[in-house]
């Protein structure tokens, strides 16, 4: 009897959910970054926790793409996420999986390599973004590069744990970043200062060759060169889908959380 | 001065986060489904909301793969998620993106088709899973098929909205499911009863041909047949990564939330 009651209750709940919650049916808007509006009660008001959480899941699972800025209603939500426990815990979950996977590999050739993106993967630009609305402001090339040129970005601690564990397993590291070639020296300095002291390759973007190309094209092409150089890309980790899509993606890929910006 | 203070505060927070939160450093476990344990204070206790949220994000972004059951510590969390506002809102966000994208398409040939998975994409098995621990129990083929054979699974309301909007745009629908061919009649009946009254194709799994093959192989092969039949797969939506990975995936793919089970 209890089971039958549960069955009816759940069926009713699933079927009638829309009416109970009074979800907004605004399918007509073309604004992809406009957050989902969930209404509560007959008047309805915007529920930040629900709507912004759906937006964040949407970008992490690669359903919401090509966005320019975060929804302005989600600035506080994203700020709390980035500065609170959840971002760190989410990053840890991904890096743990990376390590669990790496431990199963047979590492013997000296040519096994793991590709790390840099920004929001190895180094954190959170000090910059915390001053610029956590992604609500449009990207400002000048200001962002001033920040990068300081060379003071802290390490992402969970990524650094993975980095150290991979090194101890005998896996080589290739940093592959969209930062331009002219930032190579400050990037190397920043990486060392943050505790990433060893790498096989540090690849920055030759903006002459890759002018106007997407990150997917640039990174695929550079990973192909790695493989042509005899390396086996056993893993590939980044905060952007463009780090892990395309060709020569590596034997397994890992997507770190990043609700601050989108790079195609 | 205020900016400098924010800068230092954030840098400190990012750098010292590990110490503040006292995260468990259990990188030694091989159990991929064991949830992330975040400890609070020096004694430390498991924080369901943080750890299970990280697990859920991990599976949705395809970082945690090949899991058999949900972490048992997350049964209550997943139950609340599935029965509460967030699952519905997350599903809505994905379906909205699908519609925003569909509206940009030029639909003229009569051969434009959108692939829908069935379970947890078109029809909900939540009444079943609510009685079976929300994925904490190992999959039981006999009991699950008894439920399917009732033909009473309710529609997922946000998916049904997308389905209706696609039809009104002139896009054809192909249902492509891992359900076996012998369930074709009851599946068709259930779809109609739930309000999915029209389709171009209803493809179930020929378990003789695809015996021992993964869902990725089966679904890729069936999508290839669709394309060979002259269809253009403009969209593809499913709750499993195996619905949208492989070949002939369609011009754009959409991943609906599903923290209940994993199909390779």
Image: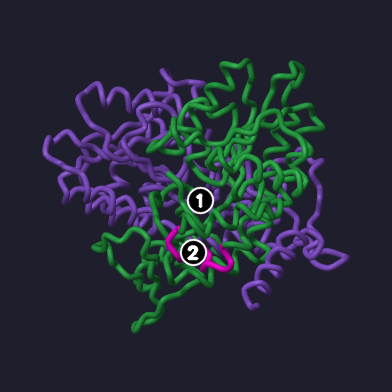
Chain colours: A green, B purple
Q: Is residue A8 above or below residue A167?
A: below
Query: Of the numbered discs in the image, which one, if any, rests on residue A60?
Result: 1
Q: What chain is tagged by disc 2?
A: B
Q: Secondary structure at mark 1?
A: helix
Q: Quadrant of the N terminus of chain B?
A: bottom right
Q: Position of residue A26 (x, y in %)?
A: 28, 66
Left or right for B26, reference A239: right
Left or right for A216, reference B233: right
First to last magenta residue range: A129-139
Q: Residue furthest bottom?
A: A43
User: Which image quadrant is residue A94 in?
Assistant: top right
Residue at (78%, 57%) from the top-left corner? B23
Left or right for A43, reference A114: left
Q: Quick check: is A130 in the magenta stretch?
A: yes
**A233 vs A124, nearest the viewer:** A124
From the image, tell me which residue sits under label 2. B86
Q: Position of residue A30 (x, y in %)?
A: 26, 60
User: Which image quadrant is residue B205 in?
Assistant: top left
Visible residue check, residue A161? no
Residue at (52%, 67%) from the top-left corner? A132
Q: Is residue B207 above or below residue A12?
A: above
Q: Position of residue A254 (x, y in %)?
A: 59, 40
**How many marks do you count on the picture?**
2
Badge 2: residue crowd in 10 Å (few <14, some 14–19, many ≥20)? some
**B261 vs A256, nearest the viewer:** A256
Q: Quick check: is A236 in the magenta stretch?
A: no
**B109 vs B21, nearest the viewer:** B21
Query: Of the numbered discs in the image, which one, if any, rests on residue B142?
Result: none
Badge 1: residue crowd in 10 Å (few <14, some 14–19, many ≥20)? many
**A38 vs A131, nearest the viewer:** A131
């Amino acid at each position: 009897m209890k089971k039958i009651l549960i069955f009816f209750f759940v069926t009713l709940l699933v079927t009638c959910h829309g009416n109970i919650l009074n979800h907004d049916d605004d399918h007509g808007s073309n604004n992809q970054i406009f957050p989902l509006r969930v209404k509560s009660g007959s008047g309805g008001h915007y529920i930040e926790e629900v709507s912004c959480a759906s937006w964040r899941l949407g970008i992490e699972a690669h359903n919401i793409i090509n966005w320019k800025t975060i929804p302005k209603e989600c600035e506080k939500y994203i700020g709390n996420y980035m500065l609170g426990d959840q971002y760190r815990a989410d990053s840890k979950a991904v890096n743990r999986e990376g390590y669990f996977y790496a431990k199963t590999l047979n590492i013997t050739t000296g040519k096994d390599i793991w590709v790390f993106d840099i920004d929001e993967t190895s180094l954190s630009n959170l000090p910059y973004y915390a001053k610029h609305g956590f992604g609500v402001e449009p990207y400002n090339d000048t200001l962002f590069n001033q920040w990068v040129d300081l060379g003071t970005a802290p390490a992402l601690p969970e990524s650094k744990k993975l980095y150290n564990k991979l090194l101890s397993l005998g896996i080589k590291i290739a940093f592959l970043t969209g930062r331009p070639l002219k930032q190579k020296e400050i990037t190397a300095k920043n990486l060392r200062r943050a505790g990433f002291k060893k790498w096989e390759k540090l690849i920055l973007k030759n903006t002459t060759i890759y002018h106007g190309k997407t990150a997917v094209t640039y990174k695929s092409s550079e990973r192909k060169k790695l493989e042509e150089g005899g390396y086996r890309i056993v893993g590939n980790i980044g905060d952007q889908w463009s780090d892990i899509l395309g060709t020569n993606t590596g034997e397994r890929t890992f997507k770190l959380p990043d609700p601050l910006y989108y790079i195609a």
